[in-house]
Image (cartoon, helix red, strand yellow):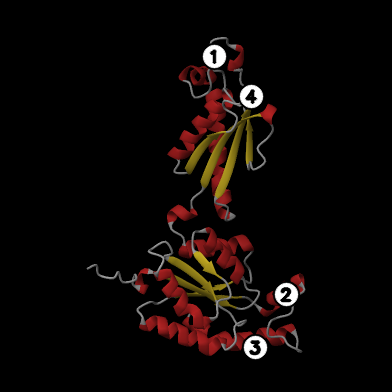
Amino acid sequence: MSTPTSPPSPAALDLVVISGLSGAGRSTAAKCLEDLGWFVVDNLPPSLLGTMVELAGRSQGSVDRVAVVVDIRSRGFTSDVNAALAELDDKGLRPRVVFLEAGDQVLVRRFDSVRRPHPLQADGTLIDGITRERELLHELRGEADLVIDTTMLNVHELRAKVAAAFADPAATALHATVMSFGYKYGLPVDADLVIDCRLLPNPHWVDELRPKNGLDAEVADYVFAQEGAREFVDAYADLLRRYEAGYLREGKHFATIAVGCTGGKHRSVAIAEALTRRLHADGVDVRVVHRDLGRE
């Protein structure tokens, strides 16, 4: 007779509770965690935190990082969130609490820009609503593991702070796709950077190379035997290292680099393969795709 399998321990779950002032960036923080692979639930009533943990425990490990946004939109917020956190603590799970805040004038400008009232404003002013919310959240702020003041932060800087606190190295690295293509078939619509290698002599005009492609050693050797070909790859590899740093600063973790020649068969394929090897050597998670190879 088989023994029933017990659900995973709550302690195995990584739980983050995102809260803070309306307009301070809760949604941006939640979206950042979602992009980093967390399972995110927005506007969850605090009383359902325990239920959320139980459901994650039944996922057989497929959901092991959960971020929950809780805020004053939920009725009975103050008492409910304290009770929910205490209940989780009794079960051996101590969630990390992230609290976002900003200065009053900045919050007023943000609400004015979207032309929405503060959820606690009622018949008063925006400042009245902000002040009331600060009072309700005062105790939770004091319990927070991480307080982020977004007064002077833009969206990208806030995402960088959240990523630095919660992402693993793989999640914060650049993931790149190098795509060869033929100009005669059109530009890739999803390219972040386009590299034109039509300045190099075309192997198509060499009879013995015409039926081959850039994956064949004879074609690659021909391409890189041309004057300036290796310097061309070196220059773009250096440029891409600079792009990587800039992309990551802006919170962008996926990039498509398109390498084009006339037909997408010879030069672009050989150059794309070489760039892929260079990026891989630099530690970039990279894959290569030859969009138009075999299309002719």
Q: Residue furthest left?
A: 1
User: Which tag is nearer the camera, tag 2 or tag 1?
Assistant: 1
Query: Residue 230: x, y in percent?
Result: 52, 25
Q: Quick check: marks 4 and 2 in contact, CB under 8 Å?
A: no
Label count reads 4
Q: Quadrant of the C terminus?
A: top right
Q: Residue at x 63, y 85 (%)?
A: 133
Query: Residue 290: x, y in percent?
Result: 55, 32
Answer above or below: position of 186 versus 205: below
Q: Residue furthest top?
A: 207
- 128 horizontally vs 164: left or right: right
Q: Residue at x 48, y 16 (%)?
A: 218
- Which mark, by number, is residue 209? 1
Secondary structure under badge 3?
helix
Residue 239 at least partly seen: yes
Q: CA distance from mark 1 to mark 4?
A: 14 Å
> What amino acid is labelled 1 in the image?
Leu
Query: Residue 276: x, y in percent?
Result: 49, 35
Counting other residues with Cα less than 10 Å from the Cα at mark 4, is it few (<14), some (14-19), or many (20 or more)?
Answer: many
- Which mark, by number, is residue 111? 2
Counting other residues with Cα less than 10 Å from the Cα at mark 1, is it few (<14), some (14-19), or many (20 or more)?
Answer: some
Q: Residue at x 57, y 35 (%)?
A: 179
- Residue at the spot of label 4: 263
Counting other residues with Cα less than 10 Å from the Cα at mark 2, is it few (<14), some (14-19), or many (20 or more)?
Answer: some
- Which mark, by number, is residue 295? none
Q: Quick check: marks 1 and 4 in contact, CB under 8 Å?
A: no
Answer above or below: position of 273 versus 149: above
